[in-house]
Image (cartoon, rainbow, N blue to C red):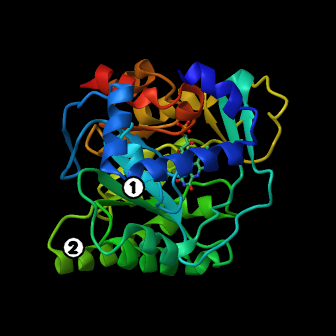
Amino acid sequence: MYDLIRPLLFKLEPEVAHAASLKAMQLVGTSSMAQAMVRTMLGVPRGQPVDFCGLRFPNRVGVAAGYDKDGQGWRGLTSLGFGHVEIGTVTPRPQAGNPKPRVFRLVEDRSVINRMGFPSGGADLMERHLGPDRPGGVVLGINIGKNKDTPLEEAAGDYETLVYRFATHADYLAVNVSSPNTPNLRRLQHRDALSGLLKTVVKARDAEVQRLGRQIPVLVKIAPDLTDEQLDGALDAITGNGVNGVIATNTTIARDGLRSRFASEKGGLSGAALTTRSAAMIDDIWKRTEGKLPIIGVGGIMSADDAKARLDAGATLVQVYTGLIYQGPGLAGEIIRATS
Ligand SMILES: Cc1cc2nc3c(=O)[nH]c(=O)nc-3n(C[C@H](O)[C@H](O)[C@H](O)COP(=O)(O)O)c2cc1C
């Protein structure tokens, strides 16, 4: 079915196609009958629940951050089979992101380059979309980031604000310090900077845990471009500050062996061209932490085999984004079948 729809979607500008698919997910999410119909049409399997960071996930596959930046479409996404959805990146104040065009399909490479730069409706809009209560039936991750115009020295304040804002709504929080499209953001991955930031985040999280009386795991999302030394520093900061796990990886700034005419566009590369690099990172993290740090694997998972390989390398859960663009909505079901 998706083989028929994909050429039509690919005729549209990437952001227009994305907006249309998100709108469809939003619509599906408004009615439980529509959700049940989509599930049946796609033959979505139930999957095997899995425990991760003290939470029970319905299955091992979720949607990566960036697809549902303002928290509109996650209810519908669960009907594709996803056991968790990571919404965001949300910033405290609304911001427009970079000028368009800022997303490019590298079709020959089954990849995407994006330089969105965190377009976000801001915390108020996301809170309105989420409503007052925590949603049930799906694990909801909220991915948080700083506003572009917040100086790096004040970044911790942005993250702290967002922890207090969204602890009530989130099952877990993801600290994004790895997008290549917000100037200098990735400097926050350096040992001392990350340690300082995480102290603030974890302190706010702990206060919310006290208040709400439930666990709220914090995960840190890292880039695939860290050197060995930088990875060591980041892992020290993560394991030394009460963080529960890592999400590896974000997009890469590397450009190896691409064929598409868009290969030299600036931004973060995702999809098949990221598979090897991202998988190697999981391997590395698992070895360096002796398998003790919980990992969500993301980056170039384009098939059930890619997902299985990531789990074999030490991840407990996986996420997809670019795979959805190229393989379509059946990908979640395929992964659930192969990993349950
Ligand atoms: C268009 C686009 C927007 C993204 N926006 C975000 C974002 O806001 N926050 C984030 O943490 N990651 C973002 N990502 C990165 C993805 O979550 C994921 O880590 C990356 O794309 C690698 O996975 P994939 O190869 O399955 O796409 C974005 C990716 C794409 C393609």
Report the amino acid beneath label 2. Val
Return the x and y of residue 9 as percentages of the image width and height: 67, 34
Tell me if residue 156 comes above or below residue 288 in the rendering.
below
Return the x and y of residue 71 as percentages of the image width and height: 46, 61
Badge 1 local density, few (<14 within 10 Å), some, or many (20+)? few
Residue extending farthest left: 213
Q: Quadrant of the C terminus?
A: top left
Along the line of sight, which residue is nearer the eye, 274 or 224?
A: 274
Q: Which residue is mark 2?
A: 209
Return the x and y of residue 10 as percentages of the image width and height: 71, 32
Name the image quarter holding residue 33. top left
What is the number of the mark on residue 288? none
Mark 2 vs 1, N-terminal side: 1
Along the line of sight, which residue is nearer the eye, 329 or 250?
A: 329
Regarding mark 2 in the picture, which secondary structure is present there? helix
Q: Which residue is mark 1?
A: 30
